[in-house]
Amino acid sequence: MNVKDDAIKAPAAISRRLRLITVIATFGGLLFGYDTGVINGALPYMSKDLGLTPVTEGMVTSSLLLGAALGAVAGGRMSDARGRRRTILTLAVLFFAGALGATLAPTTAVMIVARFVLGLAVGGASVTVPVYLAEISPAERRGALVTRNELMIVSGQLLAFTSNAIIAHLGSESGGIWRWMLVIATIPAVVLWFGMLVMPESPRWLASQTRFTEALDVLKQVRERTRAEAELAEVSALAVKDEQEKLGGWQDMKTTPWVRKLMFIGFGIAIVQQITGVNTIMYYGTQILTDAGFTSNSALSANIANGVISVLATFVGIWLLGRVNRRPLLMTGLVGTTAALLLIGVFSLVLPAGEGRAYAVLAMTVTFLAFQQGAISPVTWLMLSEIFPMRMRGFGMGVAAVALWMTNFVIGLGFPPLVSAIGVSNTFFLFVVAGIFSFTFVKLHVPETKGRTLETLEAELRTAACAHTVPRTVAAR
């Protein structure tokens, strides 16, 4: 089916329905962003009240990342087995329970467990929400709608930075102030749960369960009737083929060559998104700017500016995804982030300590985030939601997300010792080398996915992967 020729402008009611579904579902992304960002401001106050040591501080911070790795694969498995909507409802409960548990935590052990539960929800949401949006969106709007989740993630991080600053200012040094920072996350969790109660299930998941009548009913909510019927016919044919092949789990990754090839691509995209060094900026941005020459207060203010640029860049990324292909946008982002990291290393090495070096490094962190959040991160989550077969889309993305979260964990854990051992400049030069390898991987292996229905894309990827020619046949347009 040629999407561009066949697409008919949706009536206003259909557009409104799609927007509402997107807004409600992406509260999962907002919670993802808030729960990963809030610890930045809460940890110093929490350390005093709970008596945290450097080791337990690391455990409190990293327990969420380990939970996210497990939550990604478990959430993907659950969404394939029980449905995208039901999984998101379960994740909303986990978000609420984890936030409330962290807020009320009387001891470090309880805090670590609560943060691990939040990680399960974050990892599950990182997989299930993009897949749900990809499967319910028309092909020509899929890029814009799926990347709204990335916008909500960075908005959640900015909300965390901002609310932390406001609460700290209003509460001064009063005990337990960190509990107010953490409890805010219960509000969007409640909104997500009640909102998803009235949202439809993914039509493609329904079709994969041979519930074709229900799938058509959902498609009619978000497509015009003739298009809904044509799309269901395409989805149903592929569902039958996938059922015959029994696609759906670990065994397929080992025994089906074209699935194995797609998992390799998925792992690569996920790792590429992390080895840019983005979380060194998000987790240690204040420390980097302080080391560059800012005072502590100035570094905190500059870190909020990093949050703002992340949100603005994501808006630009959403706009670009509607106009340019995914693959070249990803490569452009990698060129930009690699160049920015190279200059951070050079400036840290050659410029004397003081305001000049501080503002030069700040300019490069802002540039880095503009390319990362405007190109690399939106394309990563979008492509991971597109490339896997229908019957194992949640599972495939979940396994790829495990690679992403574990890479995140290793980099977050290893960055401070690296800086201590070899210095800021040499550490960022290592990320430059990683950026060069990442660009090479994308150029050689990553396919283009823009402008096709998920069913057409699956058929192309299946054929191309079997022929071992993904970049040449699928990327060429």
Image: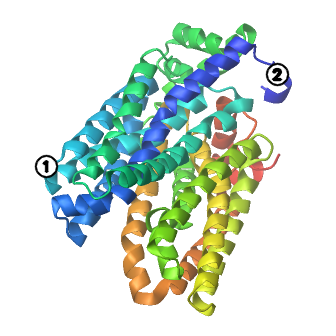
Q: How far is mark 2 from mark 1, CA to CA?
A: 59 Å
Relative to residue 195, is residue 43 drawn left or right? Answer: left
Q: Identify the disc placed on residue 297.
A: none
Of badges 2 and 1, the one in the foreground is 1
Residue 458 image point, x, y percent: 64, 36
Q: Secondary structure at mark 1?
A: loop
Which residue is tagged 2? 6
Given residues 335 and 346, the one toward you in this image is 346
The quarter of the picture where residue 187 lies is: top left
Q: Number of marks in the image?
A: 2
The quarter of the picture where residue 405 lies is: bottom left
Residue 469 image point, x, y percent: 70, 53
Residue 438 image point, x, y percent: 61, 67
Relative to residue 254, is residue 136 drawn left or right? Answer: right
Relative to residue 424, is residue 462 drawn left or right? Answer: right
- The extreme right residue here reads 5
Relative to 256, is 472 above or below?
below
Which residue is tagged 1? 106
Number of residues whose C-alpha sits closer than 10 Å to that of mark 2, classed few (under 14), some (14–19) or many (20 or more): few
| Residue under the image location 39 percent in, 24 percent down | 193
Q: Amino acid at mark 1?
A: Pro
Residue 229 image point, x, y percent: 68, 11
| Residue under the image location 16 percent in, 56 percent down | 108
Mark 2 and mark 1 residues within 8 Å of each other at the beta carbon? no
The quadrant the N terminus occupies is top right
